[in-house]
Image (cartoon, rainbow, N blue to C red):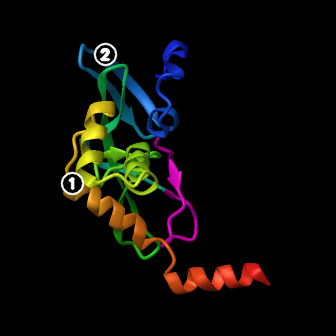
Amino acid sequence: MSIPDALHSVFTEKAAQQNRVTDITIEAERITVYLEPDVAKRYARPDCQQPVVVQLHDRETIVVQGLGMQGRALRYVVTMQRLAYLNDAGKFVTFTLPMTGLRTDLCVTDEVVERALYLLIDCNLPTPLSVQMLQSLYHIETSESALARWKSGAAAHLPSVGILIQHLNEKKR
């Protein structure tokens, strides 16, 4: 099922745009979008010279928070799929099929993390106020400690101060 044209412009998050939508329910306080990944017959795997045929190993359903809209919470019910194959050494291997736009480890969409980091870093808001704004504006249920972990995780991927100074000095030349 694809998103109906009338709703396509409403569901702008990558999760709804780039995964398979199987159902949508709209209630007074919540919009629920059901997602599944598109499964291919063969996958290139690092431990195989040729793309391998995969089989469904198991499924798990999780709920992921999206940016609420029109006064409603947005939740994605995501069916995660674990696929299995035999590698070139004959070993049984499984992997979870990734889904675009979702942070399944955090149970939120990429846009939720981006919005939280925008409030914390770009707007320099205190963490408690950021939590309150996410709840009030987007119906995101989170905690101060979760936002602190997201901020630390984003900072861990940034270059060190020394490397930044080197880059700035190189640009001066």
Left or right of 133, for residue 2: right
**Residue 153 lies in what quarter of the image?**
bottom left
- On residue 26, the disc is 2
* x then y, percent, for residue 128: 22, 50
Label 1, label 2: how many angstroms apart (C-alpha)?
Answer: 29 Å
Residue 22 in sight from this viewpoint: yes
Total residue callouts? 2
Secondary structure at badge 2 equals: strand
At a point 22% along the width and 46% down the height, the residue shown is 142
Of callouts 1 and 2, the N-terminal one: 2
User: Residue drawn at (49%, 81%), measured in percent from left and top?
Assistant: 160
Q: Which residue is found at the position 76% from the left and 81% from the top?
A: 172
Name the chief secondary structure element in magenta: loop
Answer above or below: position of 52 versus 159: above
- Residue identified by numbered label 1: 144
The residue at the point 51 percent across, 37 percent down is 18
Q: Position of residue 158 (x, y in %)?
A: 49, 72
- Percent across and percent down for residue 16 are 45, 33
Quadrant position of residue 91: bottom left
What's drawn in magenta, residue-wise? 38-52
Q: Quadrant of the C terminus?
A: bottom right
Amino acid type, label 2? Ile
Quick check: 169 left or right of 39? right
